C-alpha cells in the first residue's frame, strides 16, 4: 500500500483530498463513484492512511509512522472495512453493527475513525436509513467513505450529506504509462491492455493476469489469420472449438480490434497506430489481401454477432454464422 503518488489520474480528486488533510477540513462522508478498477479503493486507502498519519507532508501520508505501518499491515485500530455479512447487499444489520454502534466510541489511537464501505450502492433502503442518522450528526472524529458504481442507488437524503467524487475513465496514454512504469508490463502488451480496458487500470491488470483471456486472444487472432485459407468444414470445426470461450464476451472485441487494426494498417501502412502491436505480422498479411469494403463488412458482422449474443442468441450458432460471413467477405 502506498500514498497518493501510487494512483494514476484523478488529479483533481487527489488535490482536493490532500488540501482537506492539510487544512484539517476533511468531510464526514464521501461517495467515491466510478467504474470498477478506476482507482476508487486505492484512493480511499491512500486517503484513510493520510488522515491518520502522524507525520503527513503536503496532505499525504509518510509511510513510516506507527499509524501508517499499522494501516499497511491491515491492523489499524481505527480503520474499518464495512461489508455485507449474510447477503449480497449491505443490510441494515451490517450498517448497525459495523458503523452505527462503532461511531459511538472515540478512535482508539489516532485522529479519525474511518469507515470504508465497498459496494455501498448495494445498501438496502433500510440500511441507508440506518446510516442516515450517523450522516446527520456525525461525531467530529468520523469519516465514512462509500465506494460505489451507481449514484442512482442512493437515497437523495444520503446523497445530499456526502461529498461526491466522480472517478472518470483514465486516458489510455496514462494507463499505458502506469502499466509499464509501475507494474513492469511489457510495452506492446501495455498498448493493448490500455486501449482495451476502458480507462480502468484495475481492469487492465485483471486482464493481464488472466491466462484464459490471454489464451482466448491468441486463439481468436489465430482463427482470423487462417480463416480465409480454410475450407468451410474446417472453419466450422474452428467455430465449434470457440465454445469454450462462451463466458468471454471480450472474444468479439478482440476480433473487432483485429480488423480495426487491419484497416488501420491498410490506410497508414505502418504499425504505429495498431492496438494489438504484438500481432503486427498477422495484421500486415491481412491488410495486404483484404480491401476496405471487405474489412468493413467483417467489422459489421462481428458487431452484429456481439449484439445478438447479448440478446441471448445461441453462442455456438452465432459464431458459426459469423465465421461463414467472414469467409464470404
Ligand atoms: Zn505516517
Image: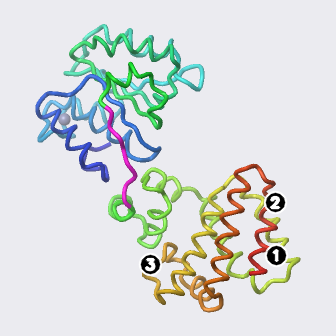
Which of discs 3 and 1 lies nearer the camera? The answer is 3
Residue 316 image label: 2
Q: Which stretch is magenta?
A: 164-171
Q: Is residue 286 left or right of residue 189?
A: right
Cα–Cα span, label 2 and label 3: 33 Å
Name the residue beneath numbered marker 1: 235
Q: Look at 39% across and 29% down and name the residue there.
A: 146
Q: Earlier in the sequence, mark 1 or mark 2?
A: 1
Q: Is residue 144 above or below residue 170?
A: above
Q: Residues within 10 Å of mark 2 (few under 14, many from 20)?
A: some
Residue in the foreground of this view, choosing between 158 and 237: 158
Against 286, residue 199 (above or below) is above
Q: Judging from the image, what secondary structure is the residue with disc 2 in?
A: helix
Residue identified by numbered label 3: 273
> Residue at 15% of width from left, 30% of height from top?
54
Residue 320 in the image: state x and y as whole percent: 81, 67
Say whether residue 190 is magenta.
Answer: no
The colouring scheme, among rainbow, by chain, secondary structure or one colour, is: rainbow
Tally of numbered tags: 3
Given the current orientation, which residue lies at the most extreme right position? 233
Mark 3 in CB contact with mark 1 (< 8 angstroms): no
Please report the residue visible at 56 percent of the width from the left and 24 percent of the height from the top. Answer: 89
| Rendered position, 88 above or below 276 | above
Between the C-alphas of marks 3 and 1, the distance is: 30 Å
Amino acid at each position: 500500500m502506498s500514498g497518493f503518488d501510487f494512483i494514476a489520474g484523478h488529479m483533481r480528486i487527489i488535490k482536493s483530498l490532500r488540501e482537506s488533510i492539510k487544512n484539517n477540513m476533511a468531510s464526514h462522508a464521501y461517495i467515491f463513484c466510478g467504474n470498477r478498477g478506476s482507482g476508487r479503493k486505492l484512493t480511499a486507502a491512500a486517503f484513510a492512511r493520510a488522515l491518520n498519519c502522524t507525520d503527513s507532508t503536503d496532505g499525504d501520508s509518510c509511510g513510516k509512522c506507527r499509524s501508517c505501518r499499522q494501516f499497511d499491515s491491515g491492523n489499524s485500530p481505527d480503520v474499518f472495512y464495512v461489508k455485507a455479512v449474510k447477503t449480497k447487499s449491505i443490510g441494515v444489520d451490517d450498517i448497525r453493527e459495523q458503523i452505527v454502534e462503532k461511531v459511538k466510541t472515540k478512535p482508539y489511537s489516532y485522529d479519525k475513525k474511518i469507515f470504508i464501505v465497498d459496494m455501498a450502492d448495494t445498501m438496502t433502503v433500510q440500511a441507508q436509513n440506518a446510516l442516515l442518522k450517523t450522516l446527520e450528526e456525525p461525531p467530529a472524529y468520523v469519516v465514512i467513505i462509500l465506494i460505489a458504481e451507481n449514484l442512482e442507488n442512493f437515497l437523495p437524503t444520503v446523497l445530499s450529506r456526502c461529498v461526491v467524487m466522480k472517478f472518470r475513465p483514465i486516458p489510455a496514454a496514462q494507463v499505458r504509462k502506469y502499466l509499464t512504469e509501475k507494474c513492469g508490463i511489457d510495452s506492446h502488451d501495455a498498448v493493448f491492455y490500455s486501449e482495451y480496458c476502458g480507462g480502468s487500470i484495475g481492469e487492465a491488470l485483471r486482464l493481464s493476469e488472466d491466462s484464459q483471456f490471454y489464451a482466448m486472444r491468441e486463439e481468436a487472432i489465430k482463427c482470423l489469420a487462417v480463416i480465409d485459407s480454410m475450407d468451410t468444414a474446417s472453419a466450422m470445426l474452428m467455430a465449434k472449438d470457440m465454445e469454450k470461450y462462451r463466458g468471454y464476451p471480450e472474444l468479439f472485441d478482440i476480433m473487432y480490434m483485429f480488423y480495426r487494426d487491419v484497416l488501420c494498417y491498410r490506410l497508414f501502412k505502418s504499425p504505429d497506430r495498431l492496438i494489438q502491436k504484438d500481432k503486427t505480422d498477422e495484421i500486415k498479411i491481412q491488410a495486404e489481401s483484404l480491401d476496405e469494403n471487405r474489412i468493413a463488412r467483417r467489422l459489421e458482422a462481428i458487431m452484429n454477432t456481439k449484439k445478438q449474443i447479448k440478446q441471448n442468441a445461441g453462442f455456438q450458432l452465432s459464431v458459426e454464422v459469423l465465421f461463414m460471413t467472414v469467409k464470404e467477405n
